[in-house]
Image (tube, rainbow, N blue to C red):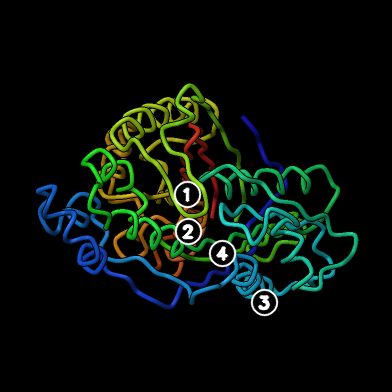
């Protein structure tokens, strides 16, 4: 367990991709394969609850949209960007193998030369890991402000998967292996963290717990243009890991119980996954702020965008305890307590 002493969330800026892509449109592109395999129309939305996801303009780079979200977060925080001591990018998507996305965003923003910049990659759990790492630097007294950014684009992987599933020799197993890729969406987000003595928000980070179950590290793996997922096994073992992590959090984090937590901001994949996680942990599902129906699975960007949208919707009030819940393929699970 990690306890935070003096760290606050000052602001969250995000940007949604402009092009809405309906699940029904995706099914139209692979209608021939679905008919041949006797898969009924509407299955994509029926199984996932995802009505649509979003795409950027073709060729949009992760660093470009992460920069736009970062500009918004800095503006909302009302701070001098010269005082930012660290920027961490947590994107699954990358502009290049090197340099880091953080390096590119650092340059785009014109941050100071003393501002540390690096990437953290841990699938859908990356943003929580980035928050934890930045918070530790702040608590250690090394920096006053940190910036965590994430830019995700799914159109390349989804488009390539559609083309793959159009092949006349695709089998039922290959269709199942590629199915989860069709749920991916796009988005960008950035968060400014601050030392508490400088905070204007008072949104205090309390602590976090993490558990790993890397015996299942090949249930979901991918490259730029494809992803292979054993959906049933990933659901089974991911939900079990979430349950164990919840139990750990209940003993390690103060006031970590469903009756004390006002709202959950989870990483979200689908309706089925969300319901299974809530049942395993024994929490009130209505306390989860959900946006997967219109955004799809946007990887590590999902959790902070969910938190931002929940505050915009008036679902979080000052003094509320918020639970941040993340699961990443690998498998890893983290839960973080925040007092708003």
Q: Residues within 10 Å of mark 3 (few under 14, many from 20)?
A: some
Q: Earlier in the sequence, mark 2 or mark 4?
A: 4
Q: Which residue is mark 3?
A: 75
Q: Work out how far the residue at label 1 is from the one at label 3, CA to CA, in angstroms.
A: 24 Å
Q: Earlier in the sequence, mark 2 or mark 1?
A: 2
Q: Which of labels 1 and 4 is toward the front? A: 4
Q: Which residue is mark 2?
A: 307
Q: Which residue is mark 4?
A: 189
Secondary structure found at label 1: strand
- For the residue pair 33 and 274, the one nearer the viewer reads as 33
What residue is rendered at 47% in x and 40% in y?
221
Judged left or right of residue 213, residue 271 is left
Q: Residues within 10 Å of mark 1 (few under 14, many from 20)?
A: many
In the rendered view, would you say 55 is above or below 257?
below
In the rendered view, would you say 197 is above or below 29?
above
Residue lying at the far right in this picture: please name it. Answer: 114
């Amino acid at each position: 367990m990690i306890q935070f002493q003096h760290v606050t969330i000052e602001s969250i800026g995000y940007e949604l991709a402009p092009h809405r892509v309906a699940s029904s449109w995706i099914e139209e592109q692979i209608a021939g394969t679905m008919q041949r395999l006797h898969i009924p129309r509407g299955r994509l939305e029926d199984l996932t609850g995802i009505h649509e996801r979003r795409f950027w303009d073709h060729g949009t780079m992760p660093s470009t949209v992460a920069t736009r979200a970062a500009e918004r977060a800095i503006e909302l925080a009302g701070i001098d960007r010269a005082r930012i001591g660290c920027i961490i990018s947590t994107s699954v998507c990358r502009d290049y193998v090197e340099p880091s996305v953080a390096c590119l965003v650092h340059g785009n923003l014109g941050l100071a030369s003393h501002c540390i910049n690096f990437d953290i990659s841990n699938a859908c759990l990356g943003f929580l890991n980035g928050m934890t790492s930045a918070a530790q630097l702040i608590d250690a007294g090394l920096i006053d402000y940190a910036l965590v950014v994430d830019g995700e684009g799914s159109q390349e992987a989804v488009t390539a998967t559609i083309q793959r599933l159009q092949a006349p020799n695709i089998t039922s197993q290959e269709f199942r292996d590629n199915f989860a890729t069709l749920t991916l969406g796009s988005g960008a987000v950035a968060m400014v963290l601050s030392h508490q003595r400088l905070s204007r928000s008072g949104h205090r980070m309390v602590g976090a717990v993490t558990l790993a179950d890397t015996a299942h590290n090949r249930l979901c793996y991918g490259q730029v243009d494809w992803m292979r997922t054993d959906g049933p096994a990933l659901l089974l073992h991911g939900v079990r890991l979430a349950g164990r992590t919840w139990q750990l959090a209940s003993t390690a984090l103060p006031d970590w119980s469903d009756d004390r937590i006002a709202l959950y901001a989870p990483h979200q994949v689908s309706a089925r996954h969300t319901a299974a996680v809530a049942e395993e942990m024994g929490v009130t599902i209505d306390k989860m702020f959900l946006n997967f129906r219109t955004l799809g699975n946007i990887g590590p960007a999902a959790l902070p965008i969910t938190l931002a949208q929940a505050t915009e919707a008036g679902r979080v009030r000052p003094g509320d305890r918020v639970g941040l819940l993340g699961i990443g393929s690998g498998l890893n699970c983290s839960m973080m307590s925040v007092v708003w």
